[in-house]
Image: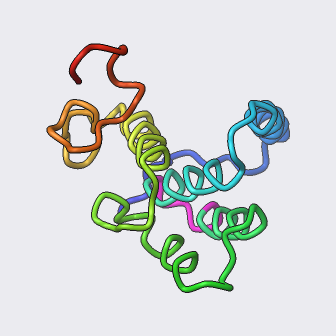
Amino acid sequence: MENRLKNKNTNNRDVWTAVGHLQKAIAAGGVDPKLLALVHLRVSQINSCSACVYAGVAGAKKAGETDETDETDERLHNVAAWREAPFYTDAERAALELAEAATRLQDGGGPARQPPRCHRRSPRPLRHCAAPGQAS
């Protein structure tokens, strides 16, 4: 897999200070830490950042994704194939899809270039995709 980050200047303190501030702001936003950890892990995989993947798994476990149950372990191992895996909620799938799309903007969209989940024919459309009374 080719590394997507061409210039990883890991010695720049300003970059790490900015990243720290961004992480604090995101954490203060009220989103479930387990969901943020799954998104971080998936984006790290896309960016081919080994240290970030390691940190993503550690962060997910710290947020409650532990190896204590088989399903939790499967969730961490299958986040790269979340579309096919049965372990994720609709909200998690929406967040992972949005994260992939944002991470792959320079590529012209996600890997499958599929329309958003809410525009596909599905027996369980996502609530946020259509206003009440409108078809999604």
The mark tally for this picture is 0
Q: Measured along the vertical axis of the image, is residue 103 above or below residue 81?
A: above
In the displayed structure image, the side of residue 108 where residue 16 appears, left or right: right
What's the magenta region? 47-52
In the image, residue 112 lies in the stretch drawn in magenta: no
Front-lying residue, 58 or 51: 58
Q: Residue at x 56, y 45 (%)?
A: 7
Residue furthest out toward the left:
121
In this rendered view, identify the residue nearer to me: 23 or 51: 23
- Res 81 → quadrant: bottom left
Quarter of the picture containing the C terminus is top left
Question: Which residue is located at x 42 percent, y 36 percent?
Answer: 98
* Side (left or right) of 110 relative to 9: left
Residue 48 part of the magenta-drawn span: yes
Percent position of residue 125, x then y: 29, 36
Please state the horizontal and vertical placement of residue 76, each as a whole percent of the image. 53, 71
Which residue sits furthest front?
133
- The location of residue 70, given as percent across then percent down, is 54, 85
Q: Residue at x 40, y 64 (%)?
A: 80
Q: Position of residue 134 (x, y in %)?
A: 25, 14
**Colour scheme:** rainbow
Image: 63 above or below 103: below
The quadrant of the picture occupied by the N terminus is: bottom left
Q: Is residue 83 above or below residue 54?
A: above
